[in-house]
Amino acid sequence: MTIYKNSNKIDSIKSVDFCKHVGYSWNEVNEIMIVLNEQADKPLYFQIYKQLKDKILSGELVENSKLPSTRVLAKTLNVGRNTVEYAYLQLCSEGYIESKVGSGFVINKIDNISYSAAEKQNLPNDPRNLNDGTVFDYKYNFQYGKLNPNDFPLKLWRKYTNYSLSSLSVKNIVAYNDRQGEIELRMEIMKYLKMSRGVHCQPEQIVICAGTQPCLTLLCQLFRQYSTDIAFEDPAYDGARDVFINNGYNVVPIMLEEDGIDLAQLEKTSAKIVYITPSHQFPTGTVLPIRKRMNLLDWALRKDAIIIEDDYDSELRYNSKPIPSLQNLDIKDRVVYIGTFSKILAPALRLSYMVLPQPWLDRYQKKFGKYNNPVPWLQQKTLENFMIFGHWERHLRKVCLIQKKKHDILIRTIGELMGDQVIIHGENAGLHILLEFSDGKERELIDKAKRCGVIVYPVSRYWMCSDKYSNNMVLLGFSSLNEHDIVSGLKLLKAAWFGD
């Protein structure tokens, strides 16, 4: 084995001699070279893991060959034993190697392992800045918003895609269709919203959009002459906030109290628009109580203001019934309601919608009446049939049950492993939680997690007034992981943050 550190050769042992040194025969261990650079931005465990993985995938390390023990490799590389253990643990978790009693770590059989140097160039990198959304494909990735592909109703979606293509309405696939979205789909959404969220509306008030951000982009243009100041919860969903900033709005941060947005602070602003997530505040998980909802509606009436209600994951409540929407209480047409299919069905379908107040319909038509709808006809028609034949409600119940099981295991395991060393925020709803630490800084906590092969996410990105943020939280999403991986990932986090 030949070893480099900081690009300076510090030791060189022929593979045959190394095999004898550790007690393996030449046939049991392949000749391998590991190059370590302590000045690199990637941790040492990751450098070891990556190089061994590449050698397995390329066939350089063959099936049933042995790796050195963690003790021997750590001594040879002059690194801590934990560093090697983290690398081996990641390889084990991904199925490249396994630990066999009496044999140590052995290379597993992997089909179709060869790939070209060009493909190696395109392998994903270790995340250095989690704020940019780039993540390495870690097995234990507590990413928010990504769903588990096993939960998507693929057979039914394929069935109703084919059904739509064979229907008489397939002629519409070669035409420009309804600019607000297919009327039949809007009728299905109207019925669903009335039943599940208490939203009162007519189909002509509904606009189908290709995601929440396109909804907000239309509203930016619609409300531009009405007001250029918009109040935002702080912290809040940065993807929504950036839409308004990029459209020239003055975003006014409003601090949160224990029960949601600070209405006294809102009252002091000149804003005539407010963006809010009242049923499950993002990212803190706070639910706006009825008293504040009524006071917020009163503020909108007195100020002649507009409330944008983003009801992004309202269906996902685990120990109580879903809370009625803010729009349900609005009798003065002050609330724009926004919903999405991304949290239950699939983000990649790009299917969201907004419900406009009646007084704004004429202005919407005058401004956007010639805009063609961005969501493909086939996508809309497939969802329409999926809903008409009752599969949406069944799928919704199924997903809620699946996510509840994951949520409950997450909360229970955190309690068992970490106890009162952390405070959980936002439990009992949605697809994520926040963990608050009495000791530890956000960046430090994320880096420690990465070093043991787990990705967790920053909360700082959601704050405008960063000086108000305690800088001691991380975000854990759980929707893309299975129950076993949630527990395994949390065990690694416990070791990384608090030791064994």
Image (cartoon, rainbow, N blue to C red):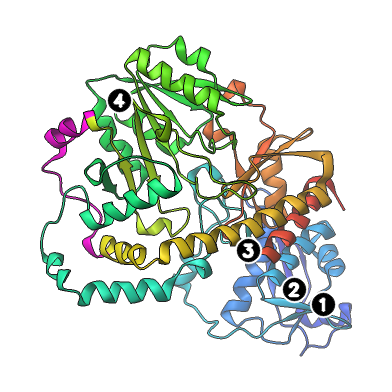
Counting residues from the N terminus, which is met first, the one under dot 2 or under dot 1? Answer: 2
Magenta segment main secondary structure: helix
Specify which label sits upstream in the sequence, 1 or 3: 1
Q: Earlier in the sequence, mark 4 or mark 3?
A: 3
Judge whether residue 408 is colored magenta: no
- Near-viewer residue (34 or 312): 312
Mark 4 or mark 1: name the one nearer the start of the chain. Answer: 1
Tell me the residue that label 4 is attached to: 248
Report whether residue 464 is seen.
no
Q: Amino acid at mark 2?
A: Met
Q: Which residues are magenta?
A: 359-378
Residue 379 point in image, percent of width and height: 28, 62
Q: Name which residue type carries label 1.
A: Phe
Helix, strand or loop for disc 3 = loop
Residue type, label 4: Gly
Disc 2 is placed on an element classified as loop
Q: Position of residue 418 (x, y in %)?
A: 81, 46
The answer to whether 87 appears left or right of 462 in the picture is right
10 Å neighbourhood of mark 2: few (<14), some, or many (≥20)? some
Q: Residue at x 32, y 49 (%)?
A: 190
